[in-house]
Amino acid sequence: MNADLRMSVLDNEVAAVHWGTVLAPMLETALAAGPKWCGIETLAEELAAGMSKIVIVFNPDDGRVWSVLYLEGHQHKLCNVLRISYCASADLDDWIHLYPTLRAWASREGFDQIAFCGRPGWKRVLKKFAVQQYVQYTDDLDDLLEVPASV
């Protein structure tokens, strides 16, 4: 745990200024490691359109960005869900103590839940928080040679 780290939700205009130098390069590592839902261009377009938010975890003393979280809000019939779609991090253990800060911000913004999928390391670091674990499976269909006309 790094007690010096802070978390900040960036205004979309501020995120746009730092997109090419800091945010996009870090998020590209998360895109490479996660499900192939989209590319970095799509994330930039969604951010510019106000469809997403960027949260950074940073050291205020030296300005180093430790983590970038790409967030999307989803309105469902029964609740508003904040989805952490991508998380690029130097070390999850260093900043996960700030998760309650993210929870408080999400609640103030009108969200009822936070949802995310992650690699196995998330399970270990989230043990201390009251999160429910569900399993999500992803089946990439790009290996199909022929797609049936009907099911």
Image (cartoon, helix red, strand yellow):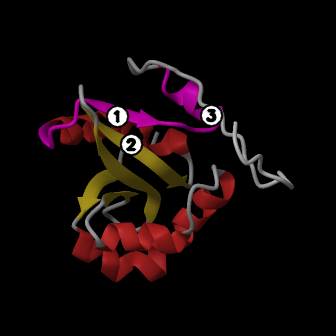
Residue 137 in the figure: left or right of residue 132: right
The crowd level at tag 2 (other Cα within 10 Å; few <14, some 14-19, many 20+) is some
The magenta span reads 108-127
The numbered mark, 1 or 2, whose residue comes first in the sequence reads: 2
The residue drawn where x is 38% and y is 42% is 83
The residue drawn where x is 47% and y is 69% is 42
The numbered mark, 3 or 2, whose residue comes first in the sequence reads: 2
In the rendered image of this protein, does residue 68 appear above or below residue 133? below
For label 3, the SS is: helix
Q: Quadrant of residue 49?
A: bottom left
Q: Label 3 is placed on what type of residue?
A: Gly
In the rendered image of this protein, does residue 99 appear above or below residue 46? above
Residue 75 appears at what percent x and percent y? Answer: 26, 40
In the rendered image of this protein, does residue 76 appear above or below residue 42? above
Q: Label 2 is placed on what type of residue?
A: Arg
Q: Is residue 62 visible?
A: no
Q: Is residue 86 visible?
A: yes
Is residue 110 located in the magenta-colored stretch of the structure?
Answer: yes
- Name the residue beneath numbered marker 2: 83
The residue drawn where x is 77% and y is 55% is 142
For label 2, the SS is: strand
Residue 27 appears at what percent x and percent y? Answer: 53, 64
- Name the residue beneath numbered marker 1: 114
Q: Label 1 is placed on what type of residue?
A: Ile
The crowd level at tag 3 (other Cα within 10 Å; few <14, some 14-19, many 20+) is few
The crowd level at tag 1 (other Cα within 10 Å; few <14, some 14-19, many 20+) is some
Q: Nearer the viewer, residue 74 or 26?
A: 74
Marks 1/2 in contact by CB < 8 Å: the verdict is yes
The residue drawn where x is 43% and y is 38% is 96
Is residue 7 located in the magenta-colored stretch of the structure?
Answer: no
Q: What whole-number distance in Å separates the C-alpha atoms at marks 1 and 3?
A: 18 Å
Q: What whole-number distance in Å separates the C-alpha atoms at marks 3 and 2?
A: 18 Å
